[in-house]
Image (cartoon, rainbow, N blue to C red):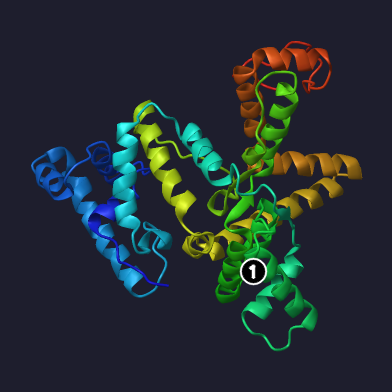
Amino acid sequence: MDQELPSLKSWLFCQVGREDDVGTLSRAFLETPGDFDHWIKEIKKSANFEKGLNQAKAEYELSVEKLRKGEYSETFPFAMTLPGMEEMSEKSQQLHSRHPDVTAREYLDLLRERDYGQFVDGRKIVYLDTNFWIGLRKVYLSDQTETTEFSKLFILLTELKKEGAILCPLSFPLLVELFKQSDSATRTATAELIEHFSDDVSLRHPSELLNYEVTKVLLRETELKASDFHRWTKGGFAAGEFLPESPGFDESGNRLAQKLYVDPTWHLPFSAQVRSLPIEQMIAKEEELVAALNLSFAALKDAGLERKAIRDEGIKFVFETWGLFDLIQQFASDMIARYPDEVARAMERRELRTPSADPHLIAPGSSWN
């Protein structure tokens, strides 16, 4: 795959979320659209940015050297080295600077409706287990030991895809299984194959699908509708449409930065984004989590707890580790804020229930006990 080494401008563009002098410099650049070279000359005159600029230049040179050697750069994702990325970043900055009132969530929904409003309709959705993807990958890599059954399936899926008859979408569980593949070459090949047969379409994260399904229940007696295309997202967002926030930005600055994050994540091929990730480090982190969980289970068992109590503690451990309690609370608050009347009616019909004995609706910002 062709690769372009980043310019200082492109590199600085990717540092906006940092909480140091380089991050401050990046945010100043982001909020000042225009000629980059002229901006750099002006910045050099300011003592406030001298430390950040010197640090940025040193880290930039290190990043370029790593990328030139084909190594992973902690400060510049591989996907951003693909041809045309710098031009896309510039156009993205210009576009979103002209529309500051559009939120990143609204922008994501516009992209979703544009790309999936009609695209998925009429296609048969085919969900393939990981074992099928592995078998198809062996055919894809011309592994002569693979069975003829997978060869026939590969040919059939290829023909049906050309006809626009099927879609084999990505999903969060499939993404997790993909990341468990320790060999980078076969993992990349699997990602390329998934990208091809899914047309880079993914089911949204389970928490977002919950949002979609609850919204359908809430709106079923109103003129509003939860459109089916809201189930889908791009492969780059298979792990969730999480939008970064920086304390260094005000609301408008964060809104701009989030939309600038959305564009490459939405438009870059899924396989390129997989290659960008430090998968080995992610696998190591997951192994640490599993080890900690196993130690907790062993301690609870030694303490004489029953199996159900151990299971409940394990679920609590996972929820706390991944911040799922906060996610659920935020989901409930968002639903109440967006559809207060519909939530109230659903509560009266007992279609939705609070997890506590309190019959009142959960107010935004309150806790679930």
Q: Nearer the viewer, residue 52 or 7?
A: 7
Q: Is residue 366 visible?
A: no
Q: Is residue 271 above or below residue 26?
A: below
- What residue is rendered at 77% in x and 17% in y? 346
Q: Nearer the viewer, residue 306 or 90?
A: 90
Residue picked out by circle 1: 181
For badge 1, the amino acid type reads: Gln
Q: Nearer the viewer, residue 331 or 100?
A: 100
Q: Quadrant of the N terminus?
A: bottom left
Q: Nearer the viewer, residue 244 or 351?
A: 351
Residue reaching furthest bottom?
Answer: 144
Q: Is residue 267 above or below residue 149?
A: above
- What residue is rendered at 24% in x and 42% in y? 29
Q: Is residue 180 left or right of residue 88?
A: right
Q: Position of residue 297 (x, y in %)?
A: 79, 50
Q: Is residue 247 left or right of residue 33?
A: right
Q: Position of residue 116 (x, y in %)?
A: 58, 45
Q: Is residue 81 above or below residue 151?
A: above
